[in-house]
Amino acid sequence: MNILNAQKAVDIWINEHGVRYFDELTNMAMLTEEVGEVARIIARRYGEQSEKETDKNKDLGDELADVLFVVLCLANQTKVDLQEAFEKNLKKKTQRDHDRHHNNEKLK
């Protein structure tokens, strides 16, 4: 599924199951919450914090998908074609950062 199709799928889901989109500020708060859940898993599973027994069954992929879902909601609400924006962003990063990263001694 490409990003445009993902945006359409989220819109269909919202209209069939979610009644309507939450407002943009609510979705921004929800995005922050979901990113926090991802951060908690990463910090405990891959970082130096110990993982609580209750966190061991948390699914990182599911939490990342929650983040993506809210991002897609925000894109739909604000009329952003995320497919186009991502492709443009990737091109910008490729042009700007190719040599910078290859020449970064910290990455060797």
Image (tube, grey):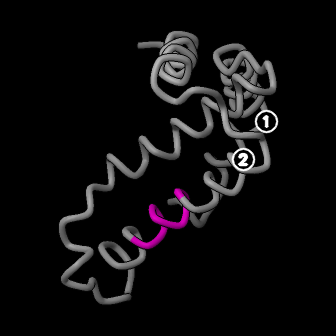
Residue 96 place in picture, x, y as percent: 79, 35
Q: 98 or 22: nearer the eye?
A: 22
- Packing grade of label 1 (10 A; few <14, some 14-19, many >=20) is few
Residue matched to label 2: 100
Look at the numbered discs 2 and 1 and tell me whether their residues touch, using CB distance below 8 Å. Answer: yes
Dot 2 falls on a residue whose secondary structure is helix
* Magenta-drawn stretch contains 28: no
Q: Residue placed at 81% from the left, 26% from the top?
A: 78
Question: What amino acid type should be assigned to the residue bearing mark 2?
Answer: Arg
- Residue range in magenta is 34-40
Q: Is residue 36 magenta?
A: yes
Compared with 74, 40 (above or below) is below
- Circle 1 SS class: helix
Q: Main secondary structure of the magenta part?
A: helix
**Residue 88 % position (x, y):** 75, 20
> How far across and how far down the image is residue 89, in percent?
73, 28
